Amino acid sequence: MVLIFGGTTEGRIAVRVLDQAGTPYYYSTRGNAQQIECKHGTRVAGGMDHDAMLAFCTTHDIRLIIDAAHPFASLLHATVGEVSGQLDIPVIRLERRYPERDDSLVWCDTFDEAIDYLETHDIRDLLALSGVQTIDKLRRYWEHHPCHFRVLDRDDSRDIAQRAGFPAENLLFWHEGQDELTLFRQLRPGAILTKESGESGHYDEKITAARQLDIPVIVIRRPALPDTFYIVNGEHGLRYRVERLLPGFFPLRGGFTTGSCATAATRAALQGLLTRVPQHAATITLPNGETVTLPVTSCTFTPASCTCGVTKDAGDDPDVTNGYTILSEVTLSALPGVRFLPGEGVGTVTLPGLGIAIGEPAINPTPRAMITREIEQLLRAHHVTSGVSVRISVPGGSELALKTFNPKLGITGGISIIGTSGIVRPFSSEAFVNSIRKEIQVAHALGCTRLVINSGAKSENYLRSRFPDLPPQAFVHYGNYIGDTLRAADEEGITAITMGIMIGKAVKLAEGHLDTHSRNVVMNRDFITALARKSNCPPTAITRIANLTLARELWELFANTPAFFNLLVERCLHVCHPLHPHATLDIILVPENSPE
């Protein structure tokens, strides 16, 4: 069982992630103020001291704790650390994202230190944005100097302020969407005091507004966390850690793309090159801004380079690259910027339309941007101004590429380094749909005026005989993802589409199912019966529909009633029309006896 300590934005994220598993868990908050719906979680209200937490974890067989509480809930963090240590329970800390600490601000570890600074510098008229729970901590200041506190507009906030004796007229109430600049301009405080509260605490907005008005800012540093906590700062990292620390909680495990693996390998290699210290892990930033840490499985040095490897873990996704090692060799260069060099097992681009120059290694734009960002960040941190050359390689990638779409895309000699999110979702259609889009982009770049989409090899062979003058790139497999393929074709500017479809998929599509995979939809005999009646099929043939095993039997059943097949295609066209408003669409029903 999992126990979440929440009551924050991060608590909501934790609930959203864990609810995806469909497995029971507990969600604990100090009070009842936070409105939250836990689909599979049991809500527990009331603060827990050491003994209460120990008893709860023991009684409810807690195997994993997620600390998603406020960063300044230092007593709770310490208690979680103590109890988890006693019971040998792993703890995941779902942390906020914080900007780099700005040395132009005044940083303090405690409120007493902040008060000393205010008095030493004779600063009056403080605006405190540190929360109602800190009124007592700043008493030594506000009892002798003008001070405003901004707090949440709640009765318990007023009660806390009243019990502390803070002047009610100096309370300001925060509301969603409040303009910091307008408030600061109205008050013109001598200084602003805030906590290092991160993105969800609107930290950046406060600092930006204060800077515009040249108001000094004092920041209370967030307290340190126990060293034993696994730190994550987003939903992908949280799920990844839960899957590894509590196997079986999620029915399927996720993983990381080749792009993320190449990025982690590159960061580790550059860090190793700059420090000459072997690397065992690398923390990278995903496209959504979240950071994740990947293990580094190898690290070797030459006098001028460092090469690190990260082994691809695709989780439970049937990814052909799972278990392969992505290597990155990094060297410093006299040429400015980042250069990507060809590497073993990584393909070379030979056709336009992929967003990568012909002749370049097949490293897609998103992984290139991720790798470049990590390199630039490390160079700044080490005060290095030289350029960097990166050689990504995948041993065995040349043979592996034969199992991918790469040969058809004009990528020769190896696999592609891909990934738009950096994350592999288990049994996700994302990789397949992305491949479809890439094929469409290549066809468009080659000037194909007609795209012929089809479900697989059999239908494509039939369609090639119908369109012998079209190049191979004009034929694109949609598999089961008819809707996604039509949307992509429309978005990429294709104006003429021909769809070849086998009758089994056609009866599903005609009913409105744009993903025809058998795990999502099965043949509906009642729907087929309704079509047959509208087509004036013979009653004896209609009666036999109830005993159909396979849709292909319809070819024989209605061989003398072409109106049935015409109506079937009309229904398919009707379902597909909204997805391609800028393109014409023809549908060809591929006969069952077409050549393989």
Image (spheres, rainbow, N blue to C red):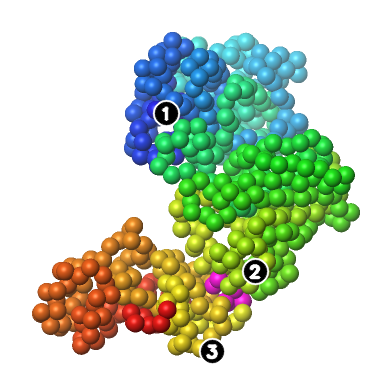
Residue 469 is marked as 3
| Crowdedness near tag 2: few (<14), some (14–19) or many (≥20) residues, C-alpha within 10 Å | many
- Residue extent of the magenta highlight: 439-445
Give the amino acid type for the residue marked by disc 1 in the picture.
Answer: Val
Give the amino acid type for the residue marked by disc 2 in the picture.
Answer: Ile
**Toward which corner of the image does residue 584 lie, by quadrant?**
bottom left
Q: Position of residue 209 (x, y in %)?
A: 65, 38
N-terminal-most mark, 1 or 3: 1
The answer to whether residue 397 is seen in the rendering is yes
**Toward which corner of the image does residue 210 lie, by quadrant?**
top right
Against 500, is 22 above or below?
above
Q: CA distance from mark 3 to mark 2?
A: 23 Å
Give the side of residue 482 with respect to residue 101, left or right: left
Against 497, is 76 above or below?
above
N-terminal-most mark, 3 or 2: 2
Which residue position is annotated with label 1?
2
Q: Nearer the viewer, mark 1 or mark 3?
A: 3
Give the side of residue 175 with respect to residue 39, left or right: right
Which residue position is annotated with label 2?
411
Q: Secondary structure at mark 3?
A: loop
Residue 222 is marked as none
Tell me what residue is drawn at x 51 percent, y 88 percent.
468
Give the amino acid type for the residue marked by disc 3 in the picture.
Answer: Asp
| Crowdedness near tag 1: few (<14), some (14–19) or many (≥20) residues, C-alpha within 10 Å | many
